[in-house]
Image (cartoon, rainbow, N blue to C red):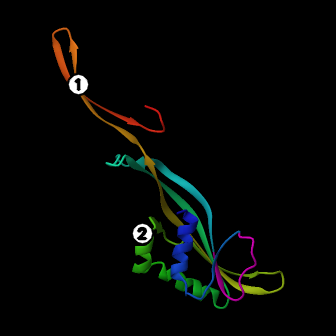
Amino acid sequence: MSARDKLHALIRAATPDNLPVIQSHQNQSPPKGDFVRVAVLSSKTVGQASTTPVDDDGYRFIYQLTTCACQVDYFGEDAEGQLQKIALRLRSEALKALSYQLDCAIQQPVAFTVIPESINGRDWHDRAMLEFTLQNREHIREFISTIDTVDGVIRTDDYKQSFTAHAEVSSGKT
């Protein structure tokens, strides 16, 4: 699941059921009435990727942490108050549990702004904007073909040495 999808899921869970939550930069007309718009503005990889050991079925996970700058806009009546409620719901135990399931975490909000905005060039709407950082852990599952253990004996003159060899094959290379 992408950071954008995780952000949308968290904000959807923090808003009332009847309030539309849309992704920013979509080619569509905004909904009638109040709505929330979400956007991942930028994403930056933090540190290096890490891997898990290969499991018994020959798979391992590769993990990477990204820091995403996010923006949530509330358009409509009492935009500031409504967005403040959403921001508070994001701190609830239920939303913390959801972010744990989604493998992400919302950091302290960095900016809260209130500005009016024209939606269609004629009508003005109250708009409140919340900006924060989303820590997101992304992962992929990779198949690593393991070769069974080979036991044998090496003879060099009068010296015998027992050995056990292990090999891993990834992407067809040994």
- Point 55% across, 84% down: residue: 15
Q: Nearer the viewer, mark 1 or mark 2?
A: 1
Instruction: Specify the principal SS of the magenta part.
Output: loop
Q: Is residue 150 above or below residue 49?
A: above
Disc 2: CA contacts within 10 A as few (<14), some (14-19) or many (>=20): few
For this view, does 129 lie left or right of residue 9? right
Q: Residue furthest right?
A: 122
Give residue 35's position: percent from left, percent from top: 65, 83
Q: Give how far apart the Cα atoms at labels 1 and 2 are.
A: 47 Å
The mark nearer the N terminus, 1 or 2, is 2
- Point 76% across, 78% down: residue: 29
Q: Residue 110, can we see it?
A: no
Give residue 74's position: percent from left, percent from top: 64, 82
Q: Is residue 167 above or below residue 65?
A: above
Q: Nearer the viewer, residue 166 or 11?
A: 166
Q: Which of the numbered marks, if any, corresponds to residue 152?
A: 1
Residue 165 covered by magenta stretch: no
Amino acid at the residue labelled 2: Gln
Q: Start and end of the magenta stretch? A: 26-37
Residue 27 covered by magenta stretch: yes
Residue for badge 2:
101
Asked if disc 1 and disc 2 are in contact, CB closer than 8 Å, the reply is: no
Image quadrant where residue 123 sits = bottom right
